[in-house]
Amino acid sequence: GKVLVFPMEGSHWLSMRDVVRELHARGHQAVVLAPEVTVHIKEEDFFTLQTYPVPYTRQGFRQQMMRNIKVVFETGNYVKTFLETSEILKNISTVLLRSCMNLLHNGSLLQHLNSSSFDMVLTDPVIPCGQVLAKYLGIPTVFFLRYIPCGIDSEATQCPKPSSYIPNLLTMLSDHMTFLQRVKNMLYPLALKYICHFSFTRYESLASELLQREVSLVEVLSHASVWLFRGDFVFDYPRPVMPNMVFIGGINCVIKKPLSQEFEAYVNASGEHGIVVFSLGSMVSEIPEKKAMEIAEALGRIPQTLLWRYTGTRPSNLAKNTILVKWLPQNDLLGHPKARAFITHSGSHGIYEGICNGVPMVMMPLFGDQMDNAKRMETRGAGVTLNVLEMTADDLENALKTVINNKSYKENIMRLSSLHKDRPIEPLDLAVFWVEYVMRHKGAPHLRPAAHDLTWYQYHSLDVIGFLLAIVLTVVFIVYKSCAYGCRKCFGGKGRVKKSHKSKTH
Amino acid sequence: DKLLVVPQDGSHWLSMKEIVEHLSERGHDIVVLVPEVNLLLGESKYYRRKSFPVPYNLEELRTRYRSFGNNHFAASSPLMAPLREYRNNMIVIDMCFFSCQSLLKDSATLSFLRENQFDALFTDPAMPCGVILAEYLKLPSIYLFRGFPCSLEHIGQSPSPVSYVPRFYTKFSDHMTFPQRLANFIANILENYLYHCLYSKYEILASDLLKRDVSLPALHQNSLWLLRYDFVFEYPRPVMPNMIFIGGTNCKKKGNLSQEFEAYVNASGEHGIVVFSLGSMVSEIPEKKAMEIAEALGRIPQTLLWRYTGTRPSNLAKNTILVKWLPQNDLLGHPKARAFITHSGSHGIYEGICNGVPMVMMPLFGDQMDNAKRMETRGAGVTLNVLEMTADDLENALKTVINNKSYKENIMRLSSLHKDRPIEPLDLAVFWVEYVMRHKGAPHLRPAAHDLTWYQYHSLDVIGFLLAIVLTVVFIVYKSCAYGCRKCFGGKGRVKKSHKSKTH
């Protein structure tokens, strides 16, 4: 079949690319739709890249992203950080929205896509643009995502999400919460609504304009046939799910290649102490000098060989055991038996690579879901979380020594690893199956819950409860009135006497 | 690995047996715990049986099952129907309880079970004897369940909004009108009562055995649920990660027809055959009803294969062949199968779906009415009320599903959706049983909801707390405003007040 892929830029694309490659291997044609200016999305031989013009340059886009990441390393109070973070998110979503508007207003491209008669759209709904396009083209969609902020994913799947035991995004809570934590968990989404309102409402008007009727974002997203979530219940907390939600966490750590000569040499030279892999992800290119020196100092104090993926200026105090590289084969290195620990920003890809290779982690979450990811691993005793802003060289040193020398971390991560890898079907195969399923059956309407056809008060049965209450109250009222009437009849005199007596004393 | 199986006698055993046989072929050592008096729990090369004494004999067992099956044909007023259904079910359910009671008090069997170091326990939790036993033996457990008689929210903290998840016995679809939603809401409340009626006895039994207060839902928390569910057949609804859907395990294998049946099918000519079975529970239909049915069957051109153990109706037509047993799935899988007359038990429905044969459904008890409703709303069958239907009704229903193309198209669509799956349900069932044995349970799939009280679960305490804060703030603001106003317009206010009190 013909698949139209509308990816999210950044690390999200990396695992979606594996699915596209597999689809191509199985004889499907994929067209990847991306803005002219991209970071990770490049032309490859297993898909056709279709670009559309956008009103910004590669340089401008990069600078914007860099500025955003820099803020993460700046210390400041809570309010300042929150405001800055929302400013960043605003900036990013403005860029994404402008890119989306350019696509959806590009008449000739839309016409071309329409005439290409695709069988389905594969998209990451964290930018709703792909789904708006699919709705316009009238073809079924499969979503490929980690989450959509502000609980939009649970609204659009009609998946119940009791705030009593399901921690909301960015709260850093576990599934066992104290009373005050549950209060926080309930109030937190309200604060986030502000950011989400900004990011998403403009897609709503864009969709309404394109589809020529008033639609809400949730309604547009609710038409997705299957939701492929990059999660699983070894990593995430158990919670209600819907039949059209499929969990494919760990999809990124299936493909393993042998190490290149360069890295093989590093690993072999590490001796009995083994190696530690250190990467803060592809988004972070430069760390402030002071922080980088602190980190370098801590790394110098442990006996392991450090492989640090870092593109910034070389810290002057870098110890002999630390090797700076511009890029490293993270999953392959973690899969090596000599890997002792993994220092990560705890993005979901990295976490899954840590889990499936069974390497304990030292986590320095930076933004987004990373704090929550770190919390999950910490509660399971498979890693230690550090606050990258506040940590000292000693903290990092201690954390590394703890996860390497304290046997329980290795045991816990190995247990998680064995649970995670024990599955009836590999996540990549599962993802491909559901994509093909949607193509074969032109969607999956039988998996769409009837809840979508109810209003919110009907969904919660408020009309039924109200009706029953009205009946009960009416009955109580009638019974009371008739009793009162009966009483008056029986003890009529007495009652009247009492009454008159009362009014006199008053 | 060693697996202890605590089965439920009757048709439930049929799908469990298939999984057990498959597990045995994969080299697991399996012990099936059976009451010494039973119907279907026979000897097998796939497993060892361990029997325990029960306080009834085969005669009583057979009588109870027979009257249970045949009572469904007794006429009664619709108002009394629920009560009749309940009483009728209790004929069998009571016996399950007696059997459980004598098992849990039989020290010889219990010590045998304790001494055998099992790795896991596989049971049908509809009658929770195995559930209690798993707790007693401290074994991780796997349940095979159809989701009846009580909804999933009782068993796994699975949310189940009454607004679009129809309750059992209601015969509603997932799109309900206001009165239906009202009835569904009330049915949900009654379900709690039913749960109490069915299971409070077992809680007492469990408390005796475990020497502590036991609530059944608490025993259910740590297990994995294999549900005979499929969302081609069921309505989409919220589920939990520890629920695995294996609907349709029973129609995987397709054997060759025996010479006898092969001959019947070949002789049917271009019109093909219709398969008719009301399940293993019904042995005898009242004569008048049976003659009505026989008459209707005689009026269609297809060859009828009717599984019936009762007296042969005198007006049986030539095209109808009575048999004591028939290879239902194999017959339905034959290209000449035109229709399937069924009591719409879940096994039969799945066989109909996977072979793509339109159905005429005569639901009798339990979840069968709801099953029939599901197939009817999907346009894959016609439902008849077995008590009220006439020969004409049955004839028309048969002609409709056979001649109206839409029924065949709909069931073929359901069939293709149902069979399009990443992994066969039987393999999935076996995988998860082995998973529980390998990992000694699946505690990471247990939702934290089990550790909350009901008001915590619904965040009522949090809402109350926030409301209290809001009200306090509003109260304080109001009071301070009032105080401020009094200060500012003090004279005026006091005047007004005194003025008021005077007039009073």
Image (tube, coloured by chain):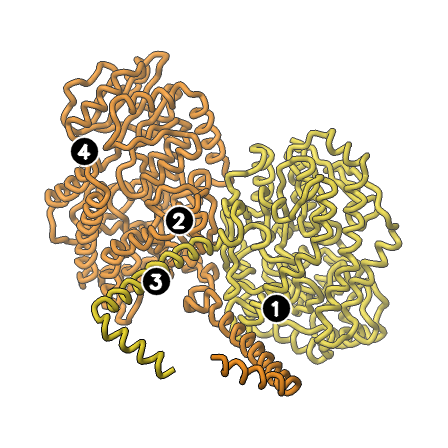
Chain colours: A orange, B yellow
Reading the image, the residue beneath label 2 is A228
Labels 3, 1: front one: 3
Reading the image, the residue beneath label 3 is B475
Q: Are marks 4 and 3 on the same chain?
A: no
Residue B419 in the image, given as x and y percentages of width and height: 54, 54
Question: Which quadrant, please, contains the C terminus of chain B?
Answer: bottom left
Question: Looking at the picture, does residue A266 appear above or below residue B443?
Answer: above
Label 1 secondary element: loop
Labels 4, 2: front one: 4
Reading the image, the residue beneath label 1 is B170
Amino acid carrying label 4: it is Ser
CA separation, marks 2 and 1?
34 Å
Reading the image, the residue beneath label 4 is A285
Earlier sequence position, callout 4 versus callout 2: 2
- The reply to whether callout 2 and callout 1 are in contact (CB within 8 Å) is no
Question: Looking at the picture, does residue B98 appear above or below residue B373?
Answer: above
Query: Which corner quadrant of the image does residue A280 belong to?
Result: top left
Amino acid carrying label 3: it is Phe
Q: Are marks 2 and 1 on the same chain?
A: no
Please state the chain letter of the residue tagged with numbered disc 4 in the rendered image. Answer: A
Residue B203 in the image, given as x and y percentages of width and height: 70, 48
Label 1: few (<14), some (14–19) or many (≥20) C-alpha neighbours in 10 Å? some
Earlier sequence position, callout 3 versus callout 1: 1
- The reply to whether callout 4 and callout 3 are in contact (CB within 8 Å) is no
Foreground of the two, A110 or B50: B50
CA separation, marks 3 and 1?
47 Å
- The reply to whether callout 3 and callout 2 are in contact (CB within 8 Å) is no
